Amino acid sequence: METGAEAITLRTLIGWLVLAFIVTAIGTPIALWVGPTDRALVVQLAGAFFAAVVIWRLVIAARGAMEVGRPSLFDLAQRKPTALVEADPSLTQIATEVRASLRQRFYFVRVLWPRFKRLAGERNAQLPLTMPPPLGRPVKDHELAAILTAIEGAR
């Protein structure tokens, strides 16, 4: 079977003829059943239904014609995804540890604070805090940001 525009147009016309036959087959008994004054209304409703379906199909066909050069969403979904950017594993580990230190002061005091002191000593950086925050108070995010900025700025 042909898959060009002519085959689609012929199939569409045949579909419209079938729809017109169905609307006529349903509308005729109704038009004969109602009184003579309401027959015009039944014919108008049947015609409006037929016109709405035809216009709906034409709008779909026009949208499809506008997207002729572009790949469909299905084709885009089948493509291989682009390569993801690989982050430095140490950066990922530090980000995880920073999140953990914001929740648990113990982790900050035992793990991160000695690392920050060592990094600051290696880079001759002055830490904004002389010691970890007092017991019972978690590390605030702005304090952590100040520490990281001081270490990073000493590069």
Image (cartoon, rainbow, N blue to C red):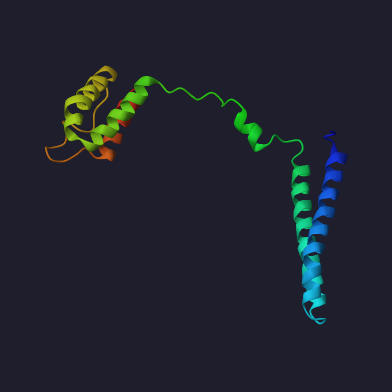
- Pick out the residue farthest to the top: 122
- Can residue 44 be seen at all in this image of the molecule? no
Q: Quadrant of residue 138?
A: top left
- Residue at 76% across / 63% down in the picture? 49
Quadrant including the N terminus: top right
Image quadrant occupied by the C terminus: top left
The front one of 14 and 135 is 14
Q: Nearer the viewer, residue 5 or 90?
A: 5
The residue at 82%/47% (across/down) is 12
Image quadrant where residue 27 sits = bottom right
- In the rendered image, residue 116, in percent from the top left (x then y), is placed at 24, 25
Residue found 33% across the figure and 29% down from its top: 95
* Location of residue 5 in the rendering, given as x and y in whole percent from the top left corner: 85, 39
Whole-percent x, y for residue 128 in the image: 23, 33
Depth check: give the residue in front, 33 or 16. 33
User: In the visual, does 80 lie left or right of 130?
Assistant: right
In the image, 100 versus 43, the foreground residue is 43
Q: Can residue 15 be seen at all in this image of the molecule? A: yes
Q: Residue at x 81, y 50 (%)?
A: 15
Picture quadrant where residue 114 is located: top left
As displayed, is residue 5 above or below residue 48?
above
Report the side of 153 relative to 110 (left or right): right
